[in-house]
Amino acid sequence: LDDRGFLGHPSGLGTLFNAELWERFSYYGMRAILAYYLYTAVSEGGLGIDQPTALSIVATYGASVYLLSVVGAWLADRVIGAFRATLYGAVVIMLGHVFLALPIAAMSWVGIATVALGTGLQKASISAVVGQLYDREDGRRDAGFSIFYMSVNIGSFCAPFVVTFLKDRWGFHAGFSAAAVGMAFGLIGLFVFRKHLHGAGTNPTSPLTAAERGTVMRRVGLGVVGVAAVAAICFALSGTTANGVINTVTVMSVIAAVGMFAMMFKSPKVSAAERRHLQAYVPLWIGAALFWMIFEQAASKMAAFAAERTDLGSIFGIKVNAEFFQSVNPLFVVALAPVFAAMWLRRAGKFPSTGAKFAFGVLMAGLSFVLLAFYSNLWPHGPTAPMWALASVFVVQTIGELCLSPVGISATTKLAPAAFTTQAMALWYLTSAVGQSAAAQAIRLMEGLGDTTFFLTLGLITAGFSLVLMALVPWIGRHMRDVEAVKTA
Ligand code: GLN
């Protein structure tokens, strides 16, 4: 079908663009104030949790969103199709934000869990529908994903301003209500413009057959028992409920990632060539997990740095709120993504290969935290660091992101075994789950060591791994030569 209804792309991309924009608006809007909500004193409208625990919870919330995409992706590939998973996800997310908008502390936890569940249904699924808008040989696919990545960042750029405006006037719950309204817009658009998708994502890619049903049901049952057992052990060993949740999500993220790789390596549906691609994917995957470990701390450690260590002044006469720092990254993504896309297009088939781009992206993440450690050491007390300091850390991370994230999504759709379309997307998002779990653990383990040591340690580990990745670039290139070649054609 030669549909060029949306910026030269299938008009269905417009439907998904709108849906993702609002979903990310709601996700990042809520996330911009979540840490502050958790650690602000009860007398000031927060939940009054101690700060390290609050920041660990934020990281764990981020991890569970991406961890649950495994469940959503499985349902999409095997039972309901990626479109329905996207649609149902939108309903669940909206409900979650409505719960958060209620001024009842207990409902906040229900809301957080509900949003995580809905995002898990939607996040990988919606990207899989994007992939299905294009035929395998359609050269517009990469550009399509780049446009789609714009919707993510337009949504996440705007959200902190709107949410903070409401929060400052009427409190945290009013802020959360903006997220609910945003998600409602996304849901309505998805429903009204669903025809433009021309059936993309309607059918599961690998539907469950009647013969399989019994075995699969038994396995799902076993899986549920397994998760319950992991949770029971984690809670028994952790002392507090918060630690129980944090540890359960960490352990489950690692198990999910290892399990998913094992399943794909062993599946008879995976060809020898696909298995070779999967091998190349392993070091890229580890690099991406380290990248997100640092990057996603925008909402935890870096949010705290903005609120407590940065001298917040005004820009163009507008008073800068700590939350506004959440918009620095999406602003620079929108500004720089076209530059990077053009650069990658011009250099397609030449240096830098996928592996080299990843290595550079991971290096940038590592260096960004080394830089933050330096600033933290330079302005060690109170809110004294200038605003440009934290902003520059976000900019360095954004340059890294543009080398790693769109490249990673595109590599995932190309390296993915055909039978595992949405699940391969979920494997990609598991980098964010494992990365943020690592962050949640690091925040608690290094609680007493001070910010400078914290940032320096994570920065050096990550930068160190980028060197390993650099050494592996030729090996990775050999393993994925056939798919990289498609790109130059
Ligand atoms: N900012 C991007 C998004 O929200 C990437 C996030 C991630 O993969 N961890 O989609």
Image: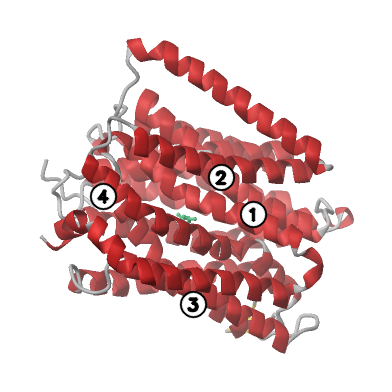
Work out how far the residue at label 3 is from the one at label 1, CA to CA, in angstroms.
21 Å
Q: Is residue 332 visible?
A: no
Instruction: Answer above or below: position of 271 versus 182.
Output: above
Residue occupying the point 55% across, 59% down: 159
Mark 3 nearby-residue class (10 Å; few <14, some 14–19, many ≥20): many
Mark 2 close to ligand 1, CB under 8 Å: no
Dot label at residue 449? none
Work out how far the residue at label 1 is from the one at label 2, CA to CA, in angstroms.
15 Å
Q: Residue furthest right?
A: 43
Give the labeled residue for mark 4.
Answer: 414
Q: Residue furthest bottom?
A: 378
Q: Nearer the viewer, mark 4 or mark 3?
A: 4
Q: Nearer the viewer, mark 4 or mark 1?
A: 4
Q: Amino acid at mark 3?
A: Val
Q: Nearer the viewer, mark 1 or mark 2?
A: 2
Instruction: Answer above or below: position of 210 versus 322.
Output: above
Dot label at residue 254? 2
Give the labeled residue for mark 3.
Answer: 396
Give the labeled residue for mark 1.
Answer: 59
